[in-house]
Image: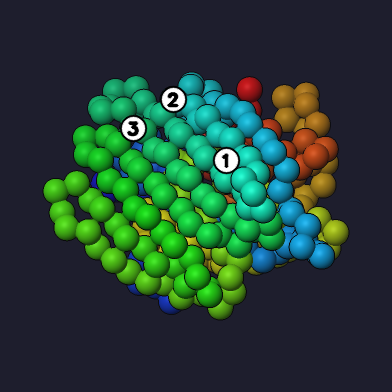
Amino acid sequence: MLAMRWMEVPMKKASAKMRLLPTIAMVLGCVISALVVANGGAAAGGASVFSPDKGRLVIQLNGETIGSEQFELTQTGNNWLAKGTTELKVPGTTPATSVSGTLMLQPDGAPISYEWTSRADKTNGAHVVFSNGTAKITLQMQGARPFEQDLSFNVPVIAILDNNLYHQYALLAKLYDWSKRGAQTFPVLIPQDLTPGTISVEATGPQTVDGKAYEGLRVTTADLEVMVLLDSNHRLMRLEVPSAKVSVVRQ
């Protein structure tokens, strides 16, 4: 990881800090983090909070395209599989970066397993298995021996937002309890950082951007605000980080 960090969030029960929105971090010479969601919107009666989705997200900095992400959410048996791959190339920097993530979820949003791979000048990755509120992580860094670590949470439904994988905000929107609305707090794991933490999520009502109407969802940390913009079915359509001049737009 590069030394420069443009935004950091103090983590509970961890000496490291959570870093959000990996794309921008790459731009500024740092690594950013993303989320997967926890207990807020678990469906009643065993029904799933998810529905199939597939699309492409274009990542922009100051209006200039610097990358894209292909993602898909599908049902497999009783569970759900969220897969995404992001390709980034910031002008004036080398090498290009590719990040892939595969997340298996229970119908209520509780994670079952997660795998990520990051390729730039080196290839790194990890496998995470979730059981009884514990994340068992096996990290494989190129040129190093595998590293294992267990992280414990008080609940089985844990939000997982990983570096440069923006489709995971779509999962967050599905897990948010829209019937209750208001500010909801989610436990979060950032697998690439081996860091647990919390985020606050709150519906903001109708929003208009570039002449288009959306349903707004504000995600906040100690020092960062992200606006997630959704369609009427609460599908991710756009993501804005005004302080960093970053937009992620669905095509």
Q: How is the image coloured?
A: rainbow
Residue located 37% across and 72% down the image = 150
Decide: few, some or many residues near mark 1? Use Cα within 10 Å; few <14, some 14-19, many ≥20. many
Residue kind at label 3, given as amino acid type: Thr
Element assignment for label 1: loop
The location of residue 188, given as percent across then percent down, is: 53, 63
Decide: few, some or many residues near mark 2? Use Cα within 10 Å; few <14, some 14-19, many ≥20. some
The answer to whether the residue labelled 1 contacts the one labelled 3, judged by CB atoms less than 8 Å apart, is no
Q: Quadrant of the C terminus?
A: top right
Residue kind at label 1, given as amino acid type: His
State the residue position of label 1.
167
Q: State how far apart marks 1 and 2 are (Cα).
A: 17 Å
The image shows residue 215, relative to residue 48, as above or below, that is above
Residue located 54% across and 26% down the image = 58
Q: Could you tell me if residue 245 is visible in this image?
A: no
State which tag comes first along the sequence, 1 or 3.
3
State the residue position of label 2.
66
Residue that protrudes farthest toward the right in the picture: 179
Element assignment for label 3: strand
Q: State how far apart marks 1 and 3 are (Cα).
A: 17 Å
Q: Is residue 30 left or right of residue 59?
A: left
The location of residue 15, given as percent across then percent down, is: 35, 72
Decide: few, some or many residues near mark 3? Use Cα within 10 Å; few <14, some 14-19, many ≥20. many
Element assignment for label 2: strand
Residue located 44% across and 67% down the image = 135
Q: State how far apart marks 3 and 2 are (Cα).
A: 11 Å
